[in-house]
Image (spheres, helix red, strand yellow):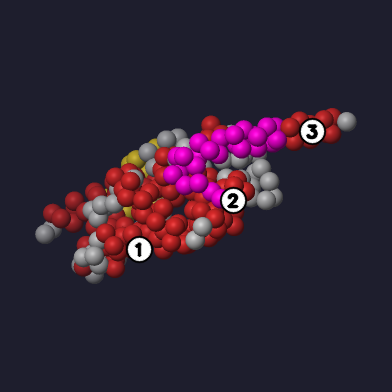
Amino acid sequence: RSTLSSSSAASDVYKRQEMDLSNNLDSLEELLSYKFSKRELLKLSLTHRSFSQENNEIYEFLGDSIINLCASIWLMNKNKDLSEGELSSLRSKIVSRKNLGRLAKNFKLEEFVILGNSISRKKIHQTEILGNTFESLVAAIYFDSNFENTSNWLSQVFEKYSDLMDLSLEKDSKTELQELLQKRQLPLPKYLNTSPKEGLFESSIVSEQNKHFLGKGSSIKEAEKDAAENYLKHLMKDE
């Protein structure tokens, strides 16, 4: 009896969540500046696998491909003088999970995602759910209209939020180090990463002369960049 009771309660929660979403879809479409002719596509694009077996995972797959293509078109139209490598670097920033999560937040998708009880809405920013949902949303717009409309919509989004996407071609210390080592025909760096305590990461590079260059940061990425910067400073002294 208790199992039936809990199952019924969960079903009631899901129904309330769906009703709340239906009432809010107008406001989401306003945020998106796009009105769906097939509302069920929008609803499915917002449905996480924790909520239902009918979810947005397949939409994520298609949305990822569409965003990659549309980002390429948008970048080529805006930056006709850039090389293939530079365009690829900028595109990787646009399609990164971190950036797609930022775009999702601008449309307040965290308020509209349909989640199961196993996931806390308060912790959704700590996951890849928002970026995945943005991909699904793009696929839903494609199915609701066509590629041209989807491409135009994404171009407007990229244009509007280009400042948030950090579309600079400045090289970070890891890239600079790799290029300098290649130029000098020296072995490429290998990063040994550790976390001596919670919230602190350390990364170490060992040079060909067996010298150690240590970096620290609040993430592995920051620690590796710091280590690379320290190794770069050492190499620059020899120039």
Q: Amino acid at mark 3?
A: Ser
Which contiguous range is marked in magenta? 13-38
Q: CA distance from mark 2 to mark 1?
A: 27 Å
User: Which residue lies at the image location 52% right of the left edge and 50% below the top edge?
Assistant: 137
- Image point (36%, 54%), residue name: 155
Q: Quadrant of the N terminus?
A: top right
The reply to whether the C-beta atoms of the residues labelled 2 and 3 are less than 8 Å apart is no
- Give the CA separation, mark 2 to mark 3: 30 Å
Mark 1 neighbour class, 10 Å CA radius: few under 14, some 14 to 19, many 20 or more: some
Residue 230 seen from this side:
yes
Residue position for label 2:
38
* Residue 66 x %, y %: 46, 60
Left or right for 237, reference 165:
left
Q: Amino acid at mark 1?
A: Ile
Q: Upstream in the sequence, badge 2 or badge 3?
A: 3
Label 3: few (<14), some or many (≥20) within 10 Å? few
Instruction: Confirm whether residue 191 shows in the render.
Output: no
Q: Is residue 117 above or below residue 239?
A: above
How many numbered discs, if any? Answer: 3
Mark 2 or mark 1: which comes first in sequence?
2
